[in-house]
Image (cartoon, rainbow, N blue to C red):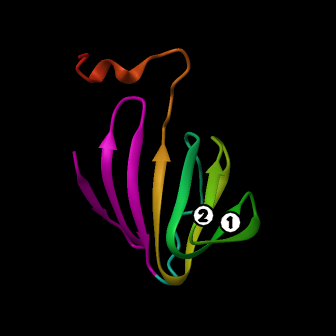
Amino acid sequence: MRKIIKTKWGLEIIFAQEDWFTGSFLEIGLNKKTPYRKAPFTCVYHILNGSVRVLLNGKLYEFSEGKTLLIREGTKYQLIGIKGVPRLIKIAKVRVENEDYSRAGKHI
């Protein structure tokens, strides 16, 4: 499964989408901003290269290559590309509770 979404702020490439998990790569243009919005679910961003400013509930932070950011459900946030062409991995909508998601594979 691969889906490419072009946006005003850059590019999102979804590489995995299940009912319990979504994984994507983000490429944020220099000085471009994602919408300031409330996170509908908890997600993790890992910065592969470049730097981003992150507006979290009205406070501004800066993250560079190699850093990981946790955004909890309900948090208002925005990503802003500030150095290079920031590339991130986004892991979202993870629900593992008491489920065993290995059932999608073949038992050998």
The amino acid marked with disc number 2 is: Gln
Q: Could you say whether the residue bearing mark 2 is in a helix, strand or loop?
A: strand
Q: Which residue is mark 1?
A: 55
Q: Is residue 78 above or below residue 82?
A: above
| Residue 96 location (% of width, % of height) | 51, 25
| Callouts 2 and 1 close, C-beta under 8 Å | yes
Q: Quadrant of residue 62?
A: bottom right
Residue positioned most to the front = 108
| Helix, strand or loop: magenta stretch | strand
Residue depicted at x 61% and y 58%: 68
Which residues, given as a range, are shown in magenta?
1-29
Residue depicted at x 32% and y 18%: 103
Q: Is residue 19 above or below residue 89?
A: above
Q: Quadrant of residue 7?
A: bottom left
Which badge, 2 or 1, comes first in the chain's sequence?
1
Taking the magenta stretch, the answer to whether it contains residue 54 is no
| Residue 3 location (% of width, % of height) | 24, 53
Q: Residues within 10 Å of mark 2 (few under 14, many from 20)?
A: many
Q: Is residue 53 above or below residue 77?
A: below
| Residue 63 location (% of width, % of height) | 65, 70
